[in-house]
Image (cartoon, helix red, strand yellow):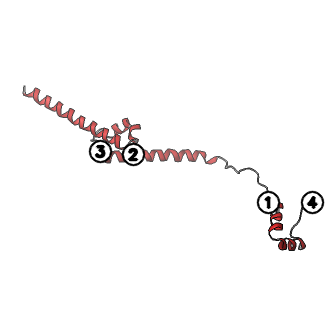
Amino acid sequence: MKKELTSIDKQFAKKSEQAKKEEKLAELLRKYPELQEQEMEFREFCEDEEPSEHLAKSFLFEKAEEIGARKEAEKKEREGLEKGTGGEKTPPAPGMSLADIERLRKSDPKEYQRLLREKKIKIPEE
């Protein structure tokens, strides 16, 4: 009879310990939603120990390192791609544009006349 009682006590203690572990795990999953995506891996990570905030943070840190390594590898794979040039670009024509010449003529006629005399403004013929 005593053996049965001790085995029942052991089973009860084990179940209550497991229930506490599950409760703590559920609390950590609520606190760190990133763990929900990898719950099974986290359970394996905490297999021998009771889940704690410290274990959750270390697990997430290790996963972040793995994710960072994967992204870095993907980036290295893409290094050989040619960078875009944005298309052909013709250099601007030397001198003033027609719009600039017209603006100068209207806003500063004396300067316009001076530049015409010095042949610094060339009016294109149409």
| Quarter holding residue 4 | top left
Which quadrant is home to the N terminus? top left
- Among numbered discs 3 and 4, the one appearing first in the sequence: 3
Q: CA distance from mark 1 to mark 3?
A: 66 Å
Q: CA distance from mark 4 to mark 1?
A: 19 Å
Counting from the top left corner in percent of width and height, residue 121 is at 86, 68
Query: Is residue 33 positioned above or below 87 on the image?
Result: above
- Among numbered discs 2 and 4, the one appearing first in the sequence: 2
Identify the residue position indicated by label 3 in the image.
52
Q: CA distance from mark 2 to mark 4?
A: 72 Å
- Among numbered discs 4 and 1, the one appearing first in the sequence: 1
- Taking 25 as reference, is 125 left or right? right
Choose between 45 and 15: the one closer to the eye: 15
- Among numbered discs 2 and 1, the one appearing first in the sequence: 2
Residue positioned 79% across, 55% down in the render: 90
**SS at badge 3:** loop
**SS at badge 1:** loop
Callout 1, which amino acid? Answer: Pro
**SS at badge 4:** loop
Identify the residue position indicated by label 2 in the image.
60
| Front label number (4 vs 1) | 4
Marks 2 and 1 close (CB-CB < 8 Å): no
Q: Residues within 10 Å of mark 1 (few under 14, many from 20)?
A: few
Counting from the top left corner in percent of width and height, residue 24 is at 28, 40
Choose between 56 and 97: the one closer to the eye: 97
